[in-house]
Image: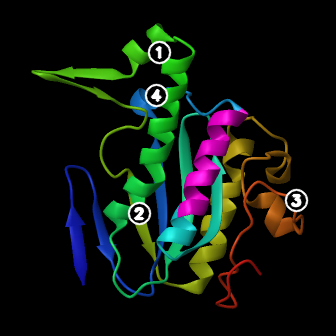
Amino acid sequence: MQSVEGKTRRAWNEPGHAHFVTYSCFRRLPLLTRDRTRRWVVDAIASVRDRHNAAVWGYVIMPEHVHLLLHPLRPRYSMSRLLTALKWPVSRAAREHLTDIGARRWLDLLTVHYPGREVFRFWQPGGGYDRNIVQEKSIAGVLEYIHANPVRRGLAKSPIDWEWSSAQYWRGDRDVPLPMDNPFVGRRHA
């Protein structure tokens, strides 16, 4: 069993396990309120699915964080690499967009100054939250938790009312931002 330790988290890169991950915007700022930015997140998730061979079972994009349930399909994988692949393209797109539109205030707010260097931060540093999911019955509970997020926050009356989650897909809609892989049949894009 491989473990990855950071300042605030421990992840187990265990073949066959799914991962329930949460990653937050820098300083928990509501940086995910625009469809453009949410689309960057969806595109990054889709890229991780394809480039890193990971099944995507559920997600929700909240104003300041993302919940994601994914299942790496390779026998050897690194959650650190998957998280980097999820976060880096969004951060890059955000920085380019803010630079292009001349949003100096936002660029300053999201830049951390270290001695001799500056770092643009769209995401909170570190790996966020990562919990291994090993039992099939836990999958349904995690999906329910993920989908209920917008309702608990008062952003939607029902999980299916929030466009930026997998709730609509699991209800049967197929015209969604990101189709899901079926955790119960071992196939992708069921």
Label 1 secondary element: helix
For mark 2, what is the residue? Answer: 82
Within 10 Å of the Cα at label 1, are there few (<14), some (14-19), or many (20+) other Cα atoms?
few
For mark 3, what is the residue? Answer: 175
Residue 95: give its label. Answer: 4
Q: Amino acid at mark 3?
A: Asp
Which mark lies nearer to you, 3 or 4?
4
- As measured in the structure, the alpha-carbon distance from the residue carrying label 1 to the one carrying label 4 is 9 Å
Q: Earlier in the sequence, mark 1 or mark 2?
A: 2
Q: Amino acid at mark 1?
A: Trp
User: Start and end of the magenta stretch?
Assistant: 35-47
Task: In the rendered view, tell whether residue 92 sits above or below residue 117.
Answer: below
Give coordinates of residue 164: x percent, y percent.
73, 47
Residue 22 is a magenta residue? no
Label 2 secondary element: helix
Residue shown at 68% from the left, 87% from the top? 187
Within 10 Å of the Cα at label 2, are there few (<14), some (14-19), or many (20+) other Cα atoms?
some
For mark 1, what is the residue? Answer: 106
Q: Amino acid at mark 4?
A: Arg
Q: Amino acid at mark 2?
A: Leu
